[in-house]
Image (cartoon, rainbow, N blue to C red):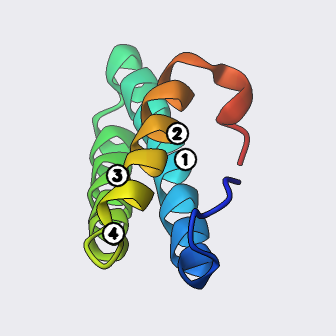
Amino acid sequence: MINAINKRHQSKVNRASKWVLKYNKLNELRNEADGNGDEKLFYNLSRKCVNAFDSYLEIIYELPAREKTQIDKLFYISNFNPLLNTL
């Protein structure tokens, strides 16, 4: 994962980055299900995406801005680097 700037926030940074990567993976699977026309799987994955993103938002709300910036970088980088999307 990534190292927190302040070690006091390390567990929240770990949890937030875990949820970001999980959301990215679920979103990828949801897009595949949408492309295949599998509505049941699409709605199931869509619900899981919402839950993962809500969990991410709950954790990120408690972090200072500089920690949020680090996690946001991970979020955007992992969208473009498939090696980071291994869960």
Which is more foreground, mark 2 or mark 3? 2
Q: Is residue 6 left or right of residue 49?
A: right
| C-alpha span from label 2 to label 1 | 8 Å
Q: Earlier in the sequence, mark 4 or mark 1?
A: 1
**Residue at image point 64% right, 77% down:** 7
Which is more foreground, mark 3 or mark 4? 4
Tag 2 near tag 1, CB within 8 Å: yes
Which is more foreground, mark 3 or mark 1? 1
Q: Earlier in the sequence, mark 3 or mark 1?
A: 1
Q: Which residue is label 3 attached to? A: 49
Q: Which residue is label 4 attached to? A: 64
Q: Quadrant of residue 64?
A: bottom left
Label 2: few (<14), some (14–19) or many (≥20) C-alpha neighbours in 10 Å: some
Q: Nearer the viewer, residue 48 or 67?
A: 67
Q: Is residue 26 left or right of residue 54?
A: right
The image's mark for residue 12 is none
Q: Nearer the viewer, residue 87 or 8?
A: 8
**Residue at image point 66% right, 22% down:** 82
Q: How far from the left and from the top, in percent, is residue 86?
A: 73, 40
Tag 4 near tag 2, CB within 8 Å: no
Q: Earlier in the sequence, mark 2 or mark 1?
A: 1
Q: Which residue is label 1 attached to? A: 21
Tag 2 near tag 3, CB within 8 Å: no
Q: Amino acid at mark 3?
A: Cys
**Residue at image point 53% right, 78% down:** 9
